[in-house]
Every structure is written in structure tokens, then in C-alpha cells.
Image (cartoon, grey):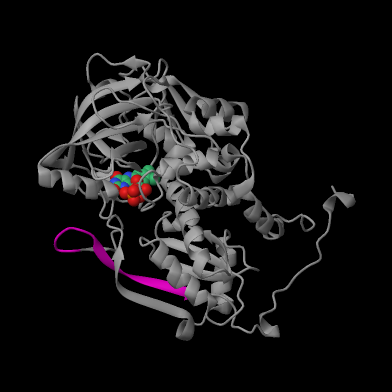
Amino acid sequence: MKKTALLGILCLLVVFPWINAGAANRPMPDDVAERLVDLGSCIDFLEKTDKLVRVKSEVDPKYELAGIAKMYEGKKCLLFEQVKGSDYPVFIGLLWNRNTIGDLFAVPKEEVPFVIAGAIGPWKKNKDQYPSPILDKGPANEVVEQEVDLYKLPVPIHALKDGGPYFDSSVVVVKNPETGIPNISIHRMMVTGKDRLTFLIDPGRHLGEYLEIMEKRNEPLQVTINNGVGLAPWIVSAIPRQGDGKHGIASHILGRPVRLMKAQTVDVPAFADAQFVIEAEILPNVREPEGPFAEVTGYYAHRDNRWVMQVKAITHRKDPVFHTLLSGQEVWNAVGFTAEAKIFATVKESVPQLQRVYLSPGGCGFYGAVVQVEKDGPEVGRKAIEQTFAAFPPLQRVVAVDTDVNLYDPIDVNWAITTRFNPDSDLMIMKNQPGHILNPMVQINPDGKGGTVTKMGMDATAPYPRTDKFERVKFIEVDLNKYQME
Ligand SMILES: Cc1cc2nc3c(=O)[nH]c(=O)nc-3n(C[C@H](O)[C@H](O)[C@H](O)COP(=O)(O)O)c2cc1C
């Protein structure tokens, strides 16, 4: 490994290739695996490492809880110990700080996408390496609620115009009706009754495809809704279009199988180590109003008739903690890390010059990416941009930079655009591309299914072959410890 540089950015540039190569093969220590799959252990770790604030006063889940959380966004996580109207505490902030996520994975934050990408490859090659046991009893069904009443759970109403209390951080497990293999994904779900939820399915989701099959048969689609599943299965469930059985990617991250368990009333497994499990059926051909909801974009998603779930049972741990999130940096990081992992794993195959990918916060984790390439030919930047758009369709803007640019630093990326980007030759405009329906710039199709948008690529890599005038200024690396300084 090269000599570690003192300045942060140089350190990153030097160390990263080593980290990148080693991440996938490093065994995960038991305590790290445990805190990635058990929310209680995760909270203990956060407390021990001074990353948690306990809110002792009683807090109203309607607006007040999210209002306090907003003041802490990007900082320490919060545990609300007393939530008005409920017996259960609420945890928030798991994903709003990339440093915290890195610490939970026990790697520098820049390495997290490589840990995920490093698990996707082996999982694809051997999906049976860590078969998940399906337990009869697990921590998540220690208590079976006698009466189904969602209003007993501390489900917050987050933003001022949200249409109701929202589950915004729970993992839905569904079985592919044709193969029986489970798929996992996260969906926002609004509580509309003691046993009723309305929820969103974006175009292209597996859940939507499976529901279409069941609606043709006019039969309900059974699901389990898993709250507080732990960071590894949670983050894996946010990787789009990965294929059924993707909870196995979490097993590859942990180096041991993620445990599933039988549900009480539906024939779909649940996460045995979740905090709460809500068993439900999606009603065929029924639509009821859902929304508005404060979305990842910083805008409200509009109210419309959407899919409906009827809840059949609620189970939980003896002392469960309810997990929620604040729409904003938490989702930017969650989608950002998983998209970075997916783009890296996919694009690297056709563009081996790709070094790193970053979905910067201003792009809401969905819409803007910076890709860094080791340029060894004139078309490398453009090719990386094209492949990145293909690998993650919600993207609307991709910038390519060289390896001497710190892609995590918006000033450095802007410097590259200012000094290496020629709009005449380096700008790529792609009209009528499929867009993500939550972005208000996307024109929704007349049938309401999906929409289109114009996308922009900017190749801000230096022209190839690089001439002297594009040589970046460098300074000597010094060890400040050698100097007497006050
Ligand atoms: C916090 C969060 C909330 C999400 N909410 C929704 C949602 O309400 N509807 C939806 O279709 N996708 C939502 N997603 C995205 C999907 O959960 C994600 O893309 C998933 O991997 C889709 O799986 P699939 O491709 O197997 O269908 C959300 C993702 C995150 C991280």
C-alpha cells in the first residue's frame, strides 16, 4: 500500500484502490454482523460510540417527532423513549450520516458501496451459499398482538402536509407467485384504519408485477411488512431490479444467513430478527387515496388512488423499537449507496477504467451521479456516462471526472467542469428518456405509468492524450507531526 497521505483528500485517493480490492474478501467480525442485523445491537453500538441522543420527554408522533428529528438530520441518531399514545420507543436517523453508516459496517464511508457490490457478485454466482433458515418462532414473533390495531404503534405523521401516519422504513416481503421465491423492497405505507394501509408501487417494481398476476386471478397477494430489520437487510432491500431472493445479498455481506421465520396468517416469510412484523394481504383491484407524502425530492408526492393492504396480524419482540426515517438525507444515502454499488458492479464489466461512483446529496441520491475513470482513451468518459445511465435509470445527470479529482467534493467536481469540460464536444443531451415519477421535472405519461425527462451527461475528464496544460498542480506531502506548531 502506498504511503498514507496526511491531507484527507490525498489519503482517500491513495488508499481507495486498496480498500476497493480488499473489501469483498474480508471476513466480517461477529459483533459487526450482529449490529447490522439486529437493531437493538445497532442502537447499543451507537450509544457506546456517542452517536445517539435519547429523547426522554414525551413527544407527539404527529409532526413533533419529525420536527425534532429535522434539527438532528445528518448528526446523531435519536431514540424517542416516550411517544404519545404508544408503548413503544421510536428510532430515527440510521442512515442520515454516511460516517455513521461506515462505522456500523466497520469500514470508511467510501468503502460501503464496495462492501455491498462485493456481496452482489458472489451472491449472483452462488445463491445457495447461505440458505436462510425459516424458523417457526423468532424474536419478531415473541409477542402476537391479540387485536390488530395499527394505531397502537408509534407511526409518525412526519411533514405538515402528509396525508396520515406513515411507515416509511419497513421492508415488504412478497413471494413471486410463479416461483415462490421471496423478494424484498421498501414502500411508503399510509395508515388509513386500524387494519388498513394504502401504499405506493413505482413503475418497474417486482411487487407491481406480482400484483398484476394476482389481480388477473382476482386473488389477494400476501405480504409481510418488516419494521426494524437491521441495516444489512434494509439496505439490500433498496437495491432495485436485482432479482428475487436478494435478502441473500445481506447474508453475503454478513458472512452468515439472514434468518427468516414463518408468519401467523400468511404464507410469506418474515425477518426473524425484525422488531415488528405486520402480516397483510394486498387486495386485488382495490384502490384508495394515499398521500400527500414528503418525498425524497423535498416535495410532496400528490394524493391519488393507490394500492390497499388489509392487515391480518401484528407480532413483535418483547421490547420492540419502532424504526422510522426522515425523508431527505436518509433516503439520499440509502438509495445513493445501493445505486453506487449497483452501478459500480454493472458498469465496471464494460468500462474497466471506472474507479468510483458517487450519488451526491444534491442529486437526492437518485438523480445525479459523478463517475471517476482512469482515462486511457478519448471515449472513456462518454462511455462511462452512457453505461451509468443504463445501469440506474432514475439518473438525470452524470458527470465524468479523472482520478486526480475528488468526486466527493462538489468544489473539486465543479473545478473539473470549469477547466476540462467543453460544452461543444463534451455535453450529452438525451431527450425523451424514462424518468423517475417522483421528480417533478418528469413528464408523467398519459396512462399514468411512468414518465419521460431529458437527461444530461457532462464529460469533465481532460482531453486524451493529456497535454502539459492539463497537468494538475501538486504539492509535496508532509508529516505535520514533525513540526513544532502552535
Ligand atoms: C426509504 C425508501 C422508500 C422507498 N419507497 C418506495 C415506495 O414507496 N414505492 C416504491 O415502489 N419503491 C420505493 N422505494 C424503492 C424500492 O424499495 C427499491 O427500489 C427496491 O429495491 C425495489 O425492489 P424491486 O426492484 O425488486 O422491485 C423506496 C426505497 C427506499 C430506500
67 over 89 or under it: above or below? below
**Magenta span of residues:** 445-458
160 over 116 or under it: above or below? above
Q: Is residue 335 left or right of residue 163?
A: right
Q: Is residue 86 left or right of residue 306?
A: right
Q: Whole-percent x and y of residue 15?
A: 70, 56
Q: How many marks?
A: 0
Q: Nearer the viewer, residue 257 or 147?
A: 257
Quarter of the view holding residue 446: bottom left
Q: Whole-percent x and y of residue 82?
A: 40, 19
195 over 406 or under it: above or below? above
Residue at 65% across, 82% down? 466
Residue at 51% across, 82% down? 422
Q: Whole-percent x and y of residue 290?
A: 19, 42
Residue 362 showing in the rendered view:
yes
Quarter of the view holding residue 270: top left
Q: Is residue 29 left or right of residue 306?
A: right
Residue 295 showing in the rendered view:
no
Residue 352 in magenta stretch: no
Residue at 30% across, 29% down? 62
Q: Nearer the viewer, residue 128 or 444?
A: 128
Q: Is residue 60 left or right of residue 12?
A: left
Q: Whole-percent x and y of residue 266?
A: 24, 28
Name the image quarter holding the N terminus. Answer: bottom right
